[in-house]
Image: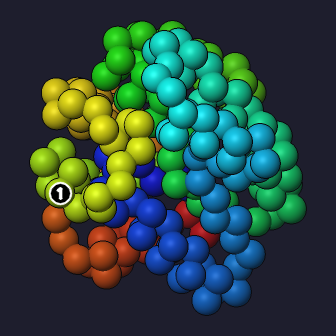
Amino acid sequence: MTFEGLDGSGKSTQVDLLAGWLRGQGRTVLATREPGGTPVGEAVRELVLHGDELAPWTEAALFAAARAEHVERAIRPALERGEDVISDRYLDSSVAYQGIARGLGEERVLDLNLAVTRGLLPDRTFFVLVDPAEARSRGGEYRDRIERETDAFMQRADEAFRALASHNPERIVTLAGDRSPDQIAEEVREHVRTLL
């Protein structure tokens, strides 16, 4: 399962709440994040979020490289052991941010990420959607390179997430992010129960 949305949407909180609930059910859970989840992924995270400006395709390729390592070293092994995997971001973020918001092309970025993950898609993706201005207001003073993007960029990313959800209703569940974390978590659990 993956959680997607703008920074400040509350997706990371939902990852933690779902992981805790599943563990309380006696399940073994890998809760992870992108970029990250492996030493290579964490190094890429530092570079893409806190380094110098990057060309759009450089950014997309670095995210894809971190994702390839993440799938090979963490996600696939956990799935093969029968664990539940919950990731804070996955390939939909690349499609939304680099493919659509940066204009590289939705299909081109999707194809790149399907290639590096050998076609691994989540069973369920939860998009926690909030207005971009609200998401930005929830952030702290420190902002990473992407969080410092313009309002227009964030609006394009938000529209991209919403379009992806409408085109993939069998996999993507849209959650209204303007509710309390507990209310959102209960809706998530209702959907997850159907997968267990």
For disc 1, the neighbor class at 10 Å (few under 14, some 14 to 19, many from 20) is few
- Which of the 4 image quarters holds residue 183? bottom left
Q: Position of residue 117 (x, y in %)?
A: 71, 30
Q: Is residue 77 left or right of residue 106?
A: right
- Which of the 4 image quarters holds residue 51? top right
Q: SS of the residue at dot 1? A: helix
Camera-side residue of 51 and 112: 51
For the point 38% across and 29% down, the residue is 96
Q: Is residue 164 left or right of residue 82?
A: left
Q: Is residue 51 above or below residue 37?
A: above
- Which of the 4 image quarters holds residue 11? bottom left
Residue 5 seen from this side: no
For the point 76% across and 66% down, the residue is 83
Q: Position of residue 127 (x, y in %)?
A: 35, 50
- Name the residue beneath numbered marker 1: 137
Residue 22 seen from this side: yes
Number of labelled discs?
1
What amino acid is found at the position of numbered circle 1 in the picture? Ser
Q: Is residue 78 above or below residue 50?
A: below
For the point 57% across and 74% down, the residue is 19
On the rendered image, what quadrant is the C terminus found in? bottom right
Q: Position of residue 82 (x, y in %)?
A: 80, 63
